[in-house]
Image: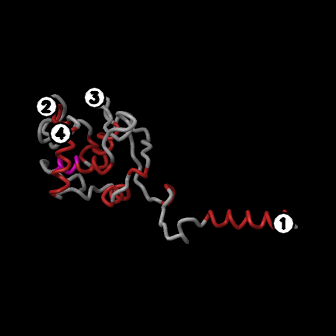
């Protein structure tokens, strides 16, 4: 009798675990519940595994589900993106506005990596780096506790696009 009661209690607990987040009001989503675009490395097209929990702002979540950068044309985001562009020394290779210097231009019609014409492609390039000498800037890739978070990358892209003829959301 006791083992039947214990089995019933365990079954009830397991069933409740399967419904966690729904009845508690916590609203927590698992990684499987999130509709997410697929990311690919600029170097070789292999899948990029980015922890979806890092997409923790409304703007980053919107980008994750659509591939569109919601910060394009937003002055506050552009200002923050410029700060990160300078802080992470992007200016040293790509020039003050992304026009190109030692590294390729990021604002013109001719991108070294054609995928950079889209914000998803530019995100992938900034996040994971290139074969041409640019190291990964994504959080945890430069150092375990350093780098740009997805929201930061989107703001850097907004800054770059503020000097370009295209928005990347076309």
Which residue in the protein does label 4 denote?
Answer: 86
Is residue 64 positioned above or below 4 on the image?
above
User: Is residue 142 part of the magenta span, yes or no?
Assistant: no
Which mark's residue is nearer the viewer, 2 or 4? 4
Is residue 6 positioned above or below 138 on the image?
below
User: Is residue 160 part of the magenta span, yes or no?
Assistant: yes
Q: Residue, x 16% and y 28% (percent of image)?
A: 102
Q: Secondary structure at mark 4?
A: helix
**Which of the two labelled residues, at mark 3 and mark 1, occupies the earlier sequence position?**
1
Q: Which residue is outermost to the right?
A: 1
For the residues bearing labels 4 and 3, Cβ distance under 8 angstroms: no
Q: Residue, x 41% and y 49% (percent of image)?
A: 38
Q: Rounded to the nearest whole Å, what is the CA distance between mark 3 and mark 1?
A: 65 Å
Which residue in the protein does label 3 denote?
Answer: 132
Question: Where the C terminus falls, by quadrant?
Answer: bottom left
**Which of the two labelled residues, at mark 4 and mark 3, occupies the earlier sequence position?**
4
**Which of the two labelled residues, at mark 2 and mark 4, occupies the earlier sequence position?**
4
Crowd band around label 2 with a 10 angstrom C-alpha radius: few (<14), some (14–19), many (20+): few
Is residue 45 positioned above or below 77 on the image?
above
**Which of the two labelled residues, at mark 2 and mark 1, occupies the earlier sequence position?**
1
Find residue 101 and name its label: 2
Q: Secondary structure at mark 1?
A: helix
Residue nearest the observer in this picture, 33 or 143 = 143
Q: Is residue 53 left or right of residue 134?
A: right
């Amino acid at each position: 009798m006791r083992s039947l009661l214990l089995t019933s209690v365990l079954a009830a607990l397991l069933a409740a675990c399967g419904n966690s987040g729904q009845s508690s009001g916590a609203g927590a989503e698992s990684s499987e519940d999130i509709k997410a675009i697929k990311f690919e490395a600029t170097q070789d097209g292999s899948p990029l595994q980015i922890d979806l929990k890092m997409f923790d702002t409304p703007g980053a979540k919107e980008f994750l589900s659509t591939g569109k950068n919601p910060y394009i044309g937003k002055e506050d985001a552009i200002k923050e993106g410029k700060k990160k562009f300078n802080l992470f020394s992007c200016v040293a290779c790509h020039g003050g506005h992304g026009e190109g210097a030692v590294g390729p231009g990021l604002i013109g019609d001719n991108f070294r990596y054609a995928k950079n014409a889209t914000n998803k492609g530019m995100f992938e390039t900034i996040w994971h780096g290139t074969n041409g000498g640019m190291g990964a800037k994504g959080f945890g890739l430069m150092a375990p506790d350093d780098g740009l978070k997805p929201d930061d990358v989107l703001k850097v892209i907004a800054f770059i696009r503020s000097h370009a003829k295209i928005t990347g959301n076309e």
